[in-house]
Amino acid sequence: MKSPVSSIRNLGPASDQSYARAGITSAEQLRDLGPDTAYFRYLNAGGTAHFIGYYAMVMGLQGRPWNDCRGREKEQLRERFDGIKARAKATPSQQKDRLAFEAALNEIGVIDRRSV
């Protein structure tokens, strides 16, 4: 029997739905993917990037409380998080969505396309 994502320390019931949108439906699957791949998929599925959410998940996968992350370890996780975020923003799907959104704003006169 598979365990829900929320069975991982630091992750609550909302995590089940958030990660399910990314195709991650169990704690075992999240563990197998690893934190960086799982978070990348979460972002690509429309999840909002939050550093605390990322490192709380990393700490939880290690069986540690979320607030156990400090100092150099936290700095290193921030670098990983920023890298994941940058890769996720560069996906063709998100670029297409961004361009469509900007075009819609331009169409209704909210932004000047030349300034984008």
Image (cartoon, rainbow, N blue to C red):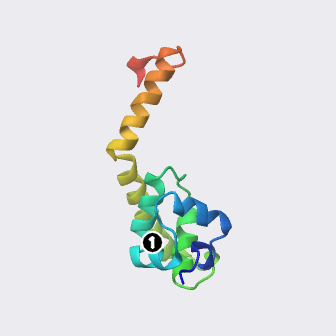
Above or below: residue 60 compared with residue 55: below
Q: Amino acid at mark 1?
A: Pro
What percent of the width, then of the height, locates residue 45?
47, 52
Quarter holding the N terminus is: bottom right
Above or below: residue 25 compared with residue 91: below
Residue at image position (47%, 29%) is: 101
Residue at image position (56%, 76%) is: 70
- Residue assigned mark 1: 35
The one nearer the camera, 82 or 19, is 19
Q: Quadrant of residue 92?
A: top left
Q: Is residue 83 left or right of residue 75?
A: left
What percent of the width, then of the height, locates residue 42?
48, 59
What percent of the width, then of the height, locates residue 10?
63, 75
Residue at image position (46%, 62%) is: 23
Above or below: residue 108 compared with residue 81: above
The one nearer the camera, 22 or 77, is 22
Q: Is residue 31 left or right of residue 18?
A: left
Residue at image position (60%, 65%) is: 15
**Element under disc 1:** helix
Q: Is residue 114 left or right of residue 63?
A: left
Quarter holding the C terminus is: top left
The one nearer the camera, 58 or 76, is 58
